[in-house]
Amino acid sequence: GAVVSQHPSWVICKSGTSVKIECRSLDFQATTMFWYRQFPKQSLMLMATSNEGSKATYEQGVEKDKFLINHASLTLSTLTVTSAHPEDSSFYICSARDPQITGVVTGELFFGEGSRLTVL
Amino acid sequence: AQSVTQPDIHITVSEGASLELRCNYSYGATPYLFWYVQSPGQGLQLLLKYFSGDTLVQGIKGFEAEFKRSQSSFNLRKPSVHWSDAAEYFCAVGPYTGTASKLTFGTGTRLQVTL
């Protein structure tokens, strides 16, 4: 089945630094990936849609200069949290669809393992 | 606008007991419905999905869900819960096709299993 992998799974950084989280589709090519943020005991909040070779589409209220998304290849999207602050501490999850399934791009999403960011 | 409601924030059941997690959705077209499970500190794993056909859908780990259009519901069930089923469960709705199509998730139901 389709596998999505995130790295790192856990990162701790100092306030003011930038952190990069990688999301890779291991056995398929993903023209679109999604980045979510999840607060403790809450649901997933869609932050942005990452598009290969073009700019990401951000959801309302998400600071695009704060959360930089780059989708440079069909198997890699990165989320960079710039000038991180303690309120950016959260669980970040990426997901993608596998266009090879039955030749139709179905709605099913495959998720990475998530990356927990702690900003001190 | 599409939306998903999971009315139960937290459910506790005894191991071996049956389970039903509720999900109600609002969607303007034919919905594509999902149930995902999330273990602590992990991403989401697909349990089952429904788009068309038989309204009773079988998934992994012994789970099933029934689509009821008249009630706009897609409740998840399991006849006998195992301690390893303790996790967070999310219902989601979205369109059937399109790489850029978004899924809308419910707020989740946390399942606790007592021995």
Image: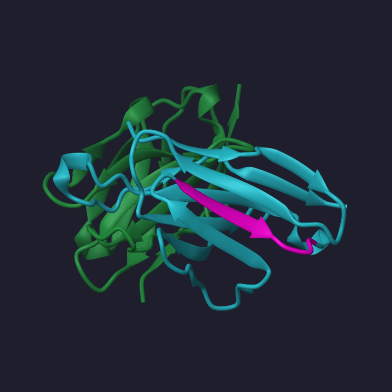
Q: Residue at 61%, 64% (x, y): give it.
A: A68
The overriding secondary structure of the stretch rendered in magenta is: strand
Tell me residue A107's x, y (percent). 28, 53
Q: Name the side, left or right, on which A84 lies relative to B46.
A: right
Of residue B79 and residue B103, the one placed in the foreground of this image is B103
**Chain letter, colour cyan:** A
Tell me residue A115's x, y (percent). 64, 44
Q: Residue at 23%, 56% (x, y): give it.
A: B68
Q: Name the side, left or right, on which B41 lies relative to B30.
A: right
User: Residue A103 appears in which quarter of the rendering?
Assistant: top left
User: Residue B12 appears in which quarter of the rendering?
Assistant: top right
Tell me residue A86's x, y (percent). 83, 59
Q: Report if residue A43 is visible in the image.
A: no
Q: Which residues are magenta?
A: A76-84
- Looking at this view, name the residue that lies furthest to the left: B53
Residue A24 included in the magenta stretch of the image: no
Q: Residue at 24%, 51% (x, y): give it.
A: A106
Of residue B88 and residue A72, the one placed in the foreground of this image is A72
Quarter of the image with the N terminus of chain A in it: top left
Of residue A6 and residue B81, the one placed in the foreground of this image is A6
Q: How is the image coloured?
A: by chain
**Chain letter, colour green:** B
Q: Report if residue A117 is visible in the image.
A: yes
